[in-house]
Image (cartoon, grey):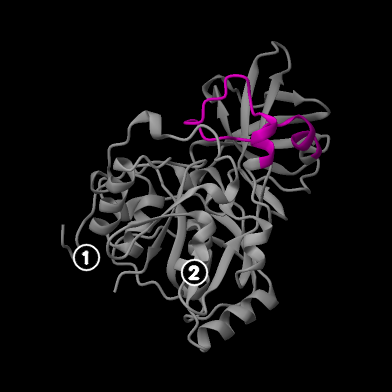
Amino acid sequence: MTRTHADRWSPADFEFELPTAQIAQSPSGRREQARLLVTGGPCQHLRFDAVRSVLPEGALVVLNDSRVVPARLYFERDGDDRRFELLWCEPAPSVLAGQELRAWVRGAKKLREGDRLTCGEVSVRYVRVDEVDPRARVFRVESGDLFEVATSRGSLPLPPYIARPEGTTDEDRARYQTVYARPPGSVAAPTAGLHFTEELLEQIPHEFVTLHVGPGTFLPMEAEDVRAHRVGTERFSLSGGAAARIERARASGRPIIAVGTTTTRALESVARENGGRIVSGSFSTDLVITPGFRFQVIVGLLTNFHLPRSSLLMLVCSLGGVEEVLAAYREAVREGYRFYSYGDAMFVRRRG
C-alpha cells in the first residue's frame, strides 16, 4: 500500500474487522489499568500505568482539558407533546434568550418552521436547517437557562456503540470524563485522556489545550476521496503560559506528545496558521488530517482505538503510517484489546 501524498485514498483503505465482543461497554476497573499497545517496530503490550516508560526522553505531553456537558436533551413540542431528542452541538454556559443554538435532532423531519419546543424551564423555537451542517437544526432560545437545564436534566451523549437502554449510569458520569476536565463545552469525551489519574499526571511534564469536541468529528467518511471529507468546526483555546512553555520545549528540542486526536488537531492547526509557531488565543478548526500531512508539532500520539472508516483512524494512520497502524490494529484484535471510547490505548510514534 505504498503511495505518495498525491494519491487518492478512499474510506475502504481505513477498514478493519472487529468482533462486536471487543467493543468496550464499560471502562476498565481502574483508569490506569487499561492496556497500552506501543507501535514503532514490534508491538509492545503494556499496561497504561507504564506509560512513562514509552515516552521519549524530555517529552512534554499536551492534553485536552475540555469537560463533557450532558448535552442530550428531550424536548416536547407545544400542541401535540411530540418528543424530540436534541444533541446540542456547541454547549456553552451563556446561551441567553434571543440567541440561537445548533442541535442534531432525532425525528428532525417531523419539525416544522416555527415549532415551539420546551424542556423544563427552557423554550426554543425551530428556525431552519443549518447552512453549514445539514444534519443540524437551528433553534432560537425564547426563555430559560439552557446550560442549567442541560446540567440538571440532560444526559451524557455516549456513543451509540455503548448500549445503555436504561440511560447513562453513575459510573458513566464519573468515568466518561477526564480527571483534569475543566471548561465545559464538549459533547464527547477526549477519550485518550480517560486513562490518566492525578498521580500519573504528577509524574509527567504536561500542558493543556482546550478543544470543545463536537459531534462531527466522529462521523464515518462517505466521500470517495477522503480529502473531500469534512467535519464540523470545533472551538479551541490555548493560554499564553501554555503556548509559551510548548514553544520553549520545541526550541530546546524536547519532543511534543499529544494525548488524543483533538489535541493533535488543535496544535497542528495553530502551527499551520502561524508559520509553524504555537501561539495563544481562541481559535476554531475544521482540519482533516489525511496521509501525506506534514506534522509540524507532535512526534507521538497517545490515543484510543477508533472506528473503521473514520477521520480519527485516518489521522492516526497519517502519523504512524497506514500499513503500520492497521497492522497494529489487527494485532490488537488478535490479542483481545478492548476498542473505542471505554477501551484500551495505544502509543503511536511519528513515522520518519
Q: Which residue occupies the foreground of this view, 9 or 229? A: 9
Label 1 to label 2: alpha-carbon separation? 27 Å
Q: Classify mark 1: helix, strand or loop.
A: loop
The residue that appears at 46% across and 55% down in the rendered structure is: 303
Residue 70 visible in the displayed image: no
Whether residue 162 is visible here, answered yes or no, is yes
Name the one closer to the observer, 157 or 102.
Answer: 157
Secondary structure, mark 2, is strand
What label sits on residue 6 in the rendered view? Answer: 1
Looking at the image, which residue is at 29% across and 47% down? 331
Indicate yes or no whether the magenta region holds residue 165.
yes
**Residue displayed at 68% across by 58% down:** 198
Q: Is residue 15 left or right of residue 134?
A: left
Q: Quadrant of residue 324?
A: bottom left
Q: In the rendered image of this protein, does residue 327 appear above or below residue 339?
A: below
From the top left corner, tell me how far across and down residue 18 is, in percent.
32, 36
Q: Residue furthest left?
A: 2
Crowd tier of the residue under label 2, counting other residues whose Cα lies within 10 Å: few below 14, some 14–19, many 20 or above: many
Q: Position of residue 258 (x, y in %)?
A: 50, 65
- Provide residue 175's location: percent of width, then percent of height: 64, 41
Q: Earlier in the sequence, mark 1 or mark 2?
A: 1
Q: Is-magenta flag for residue 137?
A: no
Q: Is residue 194 left or right of residue 9?
A: right
Can you name the residue that lies furthest to the top here?
A: 80
Mark 1 in CB contact with mark 2 (< 8 angstroms): no
Crowding at label 1, few (<14), some or many (≥20) Cα neighbours within 10 Å?
Answer: few
Quadrant of residue 170 in the image? Answer: top right
Q: Which amino acid type is marked by label 2?
A: Ile
> Which mark identifies residue 257?
2
Which residues, given as a range, are shown in magenta?
148-174
| Residue type indicated by callout 1 | Ala
Quadrant occupied by the N terminus: bottom left
